Image (cartoon, helix red, strand yellow):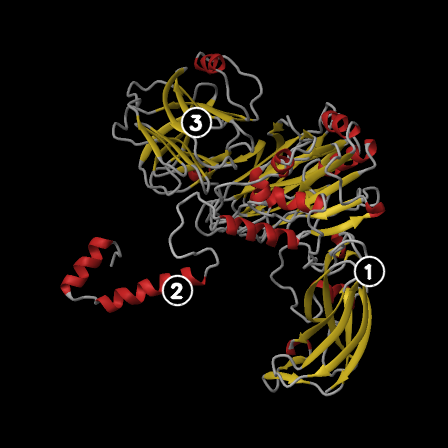
Amino acid sequence: MQFNLKAIKAALDAGEITMADVDARVSEVLRLKFRHITYYGEDTPSGYELKDFQKMMRTVGDEGMVLLKNEGALLPLSHKNKVALIGPFAADKNETVGNQGSSTVFPSYVVTLKAALEQQGIATTFAEGCGTLTYNGAQFVSAFPCRMEYFNDQELTGKPVHGRDLGALNIPEFLDEGAQPIEIEGVSGKALRCAGRVTTRVTDTPDSKAWTLAGWVRWPEQFPSAKGVFFEFSNKTQSITVRGASFEAKGSRPAKIETNWKDRNNHWIPVVVVATGDSVKLYREGKLLAEAPKTGSFSPMYIRVGADKNNRNGMAMDVDELQLWNRALSEKEIGDLATGRKVAGPVETHSFEDAQVSGGGIPGVKDRLRMSARATGKIQLDKPGKVAFRIESNGGVRVKIDGKLVYDLWDEQAGEGLRQYLWHVFDDTKAHEVVVEFSSKNHRDTGFLRVDYALPPTQDIFAEARKAAAAADVAVVCVGVSQPELQGESHDRGTYDLPSWQDELVKAVRAVNPKTVVVLFTAGGSDLRHWIKEVPAVVEAFHPGSEGGNIVSDVLFGDVNPSGRLTITWPLDEKDLAYTGPDSNYHDTINEFGYRYFDAQKKPVRFPFGYGLSYTSFAYAGLKVAKSDNPKYPATATVTVKNTGKLAGKEVVQVYVSEEKSVVEQPVRELGGFAKVDLKPGESKTVEIPLHWTAFKYFDLKQNQWVLEPGKYTVSVARNSRDIQLESSIKF
């Protein structure tokens, strides 16, 4: 039954449910509310943050910041320092929060580091340097002459059943629920006709503050009742739909404008959608037709033509010459488009000249839900440099350059598809073979694949950043991994490198200012070998949330002494990882992952598990280990910790356990317990840490139970898994 108020009252009147049933369901809701830390006895109005909740977020964030490097005690900074704040993560709210996935709830406010420093009155000069995915002003090229071969299974086995030459890898997605899409003559060359219940995934909106999407649309006169969807955009916080008879923009406050603009005279109509910081506007034939408030996030949104994303609208429509700009076009430029004149600077153009209309069928392919394809072509640059490849697909994708696998998401899949990026450095101007492999791993949709690329920059993209850094007392560079784009629900990162031109940005800033601090916004580490030896100070901020800017500022300027510790082992190189890509056949053994793996393999690491520095220093003494009557904690470790520095701070005391001899495979050492202790300068405290039973027992498959093996166990007190301070032993 439907559990709305009307249905519940009807069910009560009919005796189908009782008030006891209602009370039971309400109790479940209230139980969750009372358990939640943010519930204070009444529902909080939307958009309103309680001061104590804000304080809690800031405290948790402060405690989690990890100081990775601090040569020459560069940190903490003075509030009197003139700061050059540089990097794409310094002023971007989306990246500070790191929202992603179906559970995403974008907060009512976000404090960036730039906003926090300005609020405190710290002299700050800001320069973005580069974007999180490409350098600023990057133009993507779609031309990629290649040979596409198709296979009748998902693993590229056997001989191809069909092959053809393509000018670009631009293979849109089509869902077959009625008539098939076909290619027709358009405004310029070929166009696309969708009929029935068919949708085409075109691309994503740019990751910018404003954008414009323009195209030509025609409703064929033979379909008088069609409800065509010209454009649909959607993400977690914003959706925009342009239909034949309505225009709708939904954010935190829905807005819908009914228009009457569907034509039956079978001619092409120029349509433009312009999104800015506060509004979304719809233009037809150069004139403003409708406007709605822009209330949602500006994170990239899927763009579709055809039916809506749920395929609910039967429709018929022709589309041609879609163009996308990462800026809002002017009224004059919109008028130029309406008269067929060109407007400079589109970041994408979709003419459908090279679009493979998979809905019409691929010769020889029996089932497009069980197929694979391989595209082979060459790329040759005019000058050496880094190229950013943009890969969009809802199936498995692999990329090989000159025979070397450089991108592997073969076993990844997503219903609506993913946009991922690959950055590759070409050291010469020779022709390089590029192979893109696709597998229709998604069993709901026909697959789609699109690949384009941004060539190396021709201008000095770091000039503004270098100028700001050279004039400042200290440079703070905020770099990281874009969570909405590169990692999250249903997809993992395709590379361990820092994305975009961020490594080059760090090196450019460090070259003009030796007092450079790098703040990392990552969620699993990144390859730092390109600059870690030259940069004196590094802080890992993760994705710190609403109070992120204040939290990072607290640590940088010493208002909080960092006490966070790494919950991962940070390798020297991606090659040192046990697994570097999706693999369904890995061996789940005791020493296969994490610090256990690195210890068992005796691999050097960048930063060990449990690592983290402080602005003060600590000393350990008097380790004692004793048995306990508590079955959950069969032993306890007691140690005295002293703050030997000049600042108050918190130390995380970690206790590891290892067995000298065992009949089964055991880790070199295993975390048995830990505690954080707060100490003033010169102060000492004795800390007692219960050691969990899992550090002593192993699971016996024959007995089908956990077993405590008799013998001698070494108990080590450490600052991290590689920095042992004291050792003792205990026998069971």
Q: Nearer the viewer, mark 1 or mark 3?
A: 1
In x, y percent, where is residue 37? 48, 58
**How far apart, in angstroms, are the residues tagged by discs 1 and 2?**
46 Å
> Looking at the image, is mark 1 or mark 2 nearer the viewer?
1
The foreground one among 242 and 341 is 242
Tell me if residue 501 can be seen: yes
Number of numbered labels in the structure image? 3
Q: Is residue 403 above or below residue 33?
A: above
Residue at image location 62% in from the left, 56% down from the top: 582
* Residue 445 picture location, percent across and down: 44, 47
The x, y position of residue 387, in whole percent, is: 69, 34
In depth, the one of 91 and 235 nearer the eye is 91
Badge 3 or badge 2: first in the primary sequence: 2
Return the residue found at the far left.
Answer: 14
Rate crowding at label 2 as few (under 14), some (14 to 19) or many (20 or more) other CA atoms within 10 Å.
few
SS for callout 3: strand
Residue position marked by numbered label 3 in the rendering:
279
Q: Which mark is residue 644?
A: 1
**The residue under label 3 is which amino acid type?**
Ser
Q: Is residue 517 left or right of residue 413?
A: right
The local crowd at label 3, few if under 14, some if 14 to 19, many if 20 or more residues have their Cα within 10 Å, is: some
Q: Secondary structure at mark 1?
A: loop
Judging by the rendered image, the residue that carries numbered circle 2 is: 31
Tell which circle, 1 or 3, labels the residue nearer the N-terminal end. 3
